[in-house]
């Protein structure tokens, strides 16, 4: 393996790297391509996506669902390679897919290994070289070629595609050590933070709510200014809030200071409607009933108890002693329950990483570096991340497609 020469070396054998290699070789069979992977096999992280079902894309994906410095380039990227185009590409490779009502697309088997098997099969069929257990330690540009320094080897390539992913899901071997090399080549790096993950919060009630789920509207606020809101299932853990709606706020929670999560548990009910409901419930109960019984039938019992306490009402007091002022305070908690956010840097709980190579330094049509000719960035190494629901794999695949086309056609023009 020492001192091998290639037309293209793709660093990273994940979703974007494998598809990029397959598309590139399909468009120009003369290319000598190698995919190098630090782990003992490719696609480990791909197997964990979509809870093991692999949410390939979302038919409703658009630029508004993405964040980061490459956000402006996403619209162009999705025009060049849309969600429906990704579905077609995989079906041409032999993968049957199914779209759910919310636009999420899965392999018809609902198993992520079906996607990986299809990609690995195409890699073998096309004669693309896979080199595993080969960690890149440095990359140098020398004249018209790159020197890729890796485990027990120096590889040479005319073009390099970095598809190294991020440090999220470190149990799959993920890391972002390549970012230091990219920075040394002149690129700006946006500091990585965990995204699509639980949000750590400070609350005296959070531990008592561990394992409880509720549906409602969640917002993230900074100095009482609403930055973003989501609707869905909220999950309470020992020290954090979780669930898809929380995941979609986690990027902001881990990048901005002085933020709070606001939970509205009855967002479709007006203040007066809730006041009437609570007043009627008090009238229904007897003087022997306690305040802690007031929200039984509205919410999980432990959740209702935490709301009662948060409103400053003694759980052991007679329900008949609750005043109108206390009801109003309770309503304000039910529809604006505040949790102070604690920023964290735990990538082990994150599905993706926000941050990476500064998007303005990447050509949005080709994913080629504007600073280092013949160097390309695809997938999660780019400072671009999407909300839950297939957006991030769509970006990985779209960026892979654009890089593959640019490289393949460039060689065709020169031949």
Image: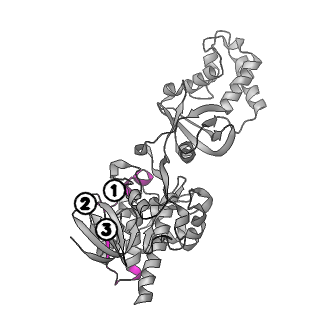
Residue closest to the far bottom: 415
Observer-side mark, 3 or 2, equals: 3
Q: Is residue 60 above or below residue 414?
A: above
Q: Quadrant of residue 142?
A: bottom left
Q: Is residue 30 magenta?
A: yes
Q: Is residue 375 visible?
A: yes
Observer-side mark, 1 or 2, equals: 2
Of mark 1 and mark 3, the one earlier in the sequence is: 1
- Display colour scheme: one colour
| Residue under numbered circle 3 | 148
Percent position (x, y) of residue 245? 57, 45
The secondary element bearing badge 1 is classed as loop
The magenta-colored residue range is 26-52
Residue closest to the far top: 288
Of mark 1 and mark 2, the one earlier in the sequence is: 1
Q: CA distance from mark 3 to mark 2?
A: 15 Å
Observer-side mark, 1 or 3, equals: 3
> Which disc is residue 44 wearing?
1
The secondary element bearing badge 2 is classed as loop
Residue pictured at 53% horizontal, 33% vertical: 201
Percent position (x, y) of residue 210? 48, 30
Answer few, some or many: residues within 10 Å of disc 3's Cα (few below 14, many 20 plus, some between 14 and 19): many
| Residue under numbered circle 2 | 133
Residue pictured at 40% horizontal, 69% vertical: 161
The secondary element bearing badge 3 is classed as strand
Could you say which is closer to the camera, residue 109 or residue 246?
246
Percent position (x, y) of residue 81? 53, 71
Q: Quadrant of residue 42?
A: bottom left
Q: CA distance from mark 1 to mark 3?
A: 23 Å
Of mark 3 and mark 2, the one earlier in the sequence is: 2
Answer few, some or many: residues within 10 Å of disc 2's Cα (few below 14, many 20 plus, some between 14 and 19): some
């Amino acid at each position: 393996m020492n001192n091998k020469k290639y037309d293209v070396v793709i660093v990273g054998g994940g979703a974007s790297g494998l598809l990029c290699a397959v598309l590139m070789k399909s468009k120009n069979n003369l290319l000598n391509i190698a995919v190098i992977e630090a782990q003992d096999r490719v696609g480990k992280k791909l197997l964990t996506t979509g809870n093991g079902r692999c949410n390939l894309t979302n038919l409703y994906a658009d630029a508004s669902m993405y964040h980061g410095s490459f956000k402006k380039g996403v619209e162009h990227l999705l025009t060049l390679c849309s969600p429906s185009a990704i579905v077609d590409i995989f079906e041409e490779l032999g993968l049957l897919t199914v779209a759910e009502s919310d636009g999420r697309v899965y392999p018809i088997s609902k198993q992520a290994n079906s996607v990986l098997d299809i990609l690995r099969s195409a890699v073998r069929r096309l004669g693309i070289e896979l080199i595993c257990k080969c960690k890149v330690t440095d990359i140098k540009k020398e004249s018209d070629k790159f020197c890729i320094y890796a485990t027990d080897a120096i590889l040479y390539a005319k073009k390099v595609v970095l598809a190294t992913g991020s440090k999220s899901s470190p149990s799959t071997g993920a890391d972002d050590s390549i970012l230091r090399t990219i920075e040394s080549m002149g690129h700006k790096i946006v500091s990585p933070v965990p995204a699509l993950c639980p949000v750590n919060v400070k609350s005296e009630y959070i531990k008592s709510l561990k394992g409880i789920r509720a549906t409602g509207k969640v917002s993230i606020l900074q100095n009482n200014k609403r930055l973003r809101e989501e609707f869905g299932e909220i999950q309470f853990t020992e020290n954090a809030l979780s669930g898809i709606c929380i995941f979609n706020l986690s990027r902001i929670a881990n990048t901005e200071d002085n933020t709070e999560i606001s939970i509205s548990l009855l967002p479709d009910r007006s203040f007066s409607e809730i006041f009437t409901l609570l007043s009627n419930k008090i009238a229904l109960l007897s003087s022997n009933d306690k305040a802690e019984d007031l929200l039984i039938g509205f919410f999980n019992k432990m959740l209702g108890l935490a709301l009662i306490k948060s409103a400053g009402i003694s759980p052991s007091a007679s329900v008949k002693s609750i005043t109108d002022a206390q009801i109003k305070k309770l309503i304000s908690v039910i529809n604006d329950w505040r949790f102070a956010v604690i920023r964290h840097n735990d990538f082990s709980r994150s599905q993706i990483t926000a941050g990476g190579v500064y998007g303005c330094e990447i050509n949005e049509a080709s994913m080629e570096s504007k600073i280092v000719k013949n160097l390309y960035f695809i997938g999660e190494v780019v400072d671009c991340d999407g909300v839950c629901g297939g957006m991030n794999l769509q970006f990985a695949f779209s960026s892979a497609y654009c890089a593959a086309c640019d490289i393949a056609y460039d060689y065709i023009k020169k031949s």
